[in-house]
Image (tube, rainbow, N blue to C red):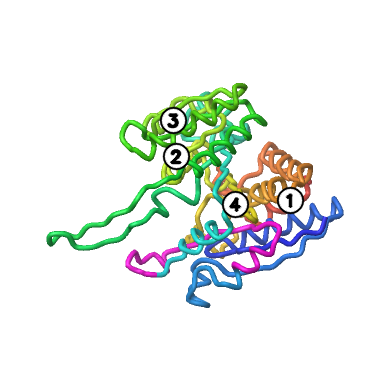
Amino acid sequence: MKAKVTLLPGDGIGPEIVQATRQVFDAVAAKFDHQFEYSEQLIGGIAIDETGNPLPEETLGACLESDAILLGAVGGPKWDDPAATVRPEQGLLRIRKELGAFANIRPVKVFDALAAASPLQPERVKGVDIVFVRELTGGIYFGTPRGREVRDDVRVGFDTMIYGADEVERIVRMAFDLARQRRGKVTSVDKANVLDTSRLWRAVAHEVAAEYPDVEYEDLLVDAMAMYLINRPADFDVVVTGNMFGDILSDEASMITGSLGMLPSASVGGRVGLFEPIHGSAPDIAGSGKANPLATILSGAMMLRLGLELHQEAEVIEHAVDRVLAAGHRTADIGGGAASLNTNAMTELVIAAL
């Protein structure tokens, strides 16, 4: 295969972990006789510094012309002023919108070798293997009207949560299709006891569920789901929900694994898939070579599988990571202690295990 891959290193540790994953891609390409053509572009804070725009048009153009996109991280204290009109995160929101990537797929899997790193008891996290399917381009993050103003001499802020039935149907259908490839269970999360938006969501979800009699289905309120993720996380298979609820719940679930440095994600459904680790830019260790590259490497595996349909190559990467962890190798964030590996050393071990 010949494929065009756009790399968006971004801010903080982004350049380090993207470079590590590129090395893994090169090793896979050599092993399977593929050719990956890379285009490295600006996004986030560094793009603001160099162009004044968190998503320059050149970056967007390169992304739209590529076969898949790998993103590092955006943001950092330098650009954290809440009063700023231009912020790094705007670049991330816009690229998802421009790509038409309406679904964020976020696996939350506890590796057996890392079960002890979880803040929960090992017996509670054993067998946890959840995929969150989060609606990504609608809901309260994009609804209008929104803003801040003065009403009766009081400052107020307001946002609009809105979903169309078509938006709900396509994301729920994706969840059911995914469940058929896994353990055959879908949990839809809403707040239908309070929100009209959620009542529409639940009604449409039931309509879709009726077309999948072979898939187990349940509705849960978001507050109940937040509790169940802690006391019975292994009960869940595919969880589908709206933009804001998915943002919060998937971050909560990520901590079950013990480290954000282990979790990949994919934003798909549009013209080109966008693949990124779920952790932030970690500015406190940026440039130190200490960053855990595994979440980005696993995001790269998702890119090969979902973006380029290279399923065997994706499995090779995932199995390599599993073997490295099973052998006891660790970075600092997953309990490496005095023997912690740096970014380069961990990357070299993964490549050797391919």
Tag 3 residue: 230
* In this view, 212 is above or below 264: above
Q: Position of residue 92 (x, y in %)?
A: 51, 60
Q: Mark 4 or mark 3, which is nearer the start of the sequence?
A: 3
Any magenta on residue 61? yes
Q: Which one is in front, 4 or 152?
A: 152
Which amino acid, mark 3? Ile
Which amino acid, mark 4? Asn
* Distance between the alpha carbons at the discs numbered 1 and 3: 35 Å
Which amino acid, mark 2? Leu
**What's drawn in magenta, residue-wise?**
60-85
Which amino acid, mark 1? Leu
Q: Mark 1 or mark 4, which is nearer the start of the sequence?
A: 4
Q: Which one is in front, 265 or 238?
A: 238
Horizontal relation, residue 31 to residue 228: left or right: right
Tag 1 residue: 308
Tag 4 residue: 292
* Distance between the alpha carbons at the discs numbered 2 and 4: 23 Å
Q: Mark 1 or mark 2, which is nearer the start of the sequence?
A: 2
Q: Give the numbered dot on residue 249.
A: 2
Horizontal relation, residue 353 to residue 116: left or right: right
Q: Residue at x 59, y 38 (%)?
A: 174
Any magenta on residue 347? no
Q: Mark 4 or mark 2, which is nearer the start of the sequence?
A: 2
Q: Mark 2 or mark 3, which is nearer the start of the sequence?
A: 3
Is disc 3 in contact with disc 4, using a CB cutoff of under 8 Å? no
Q: Secondary structure at mark 1?
A: loop
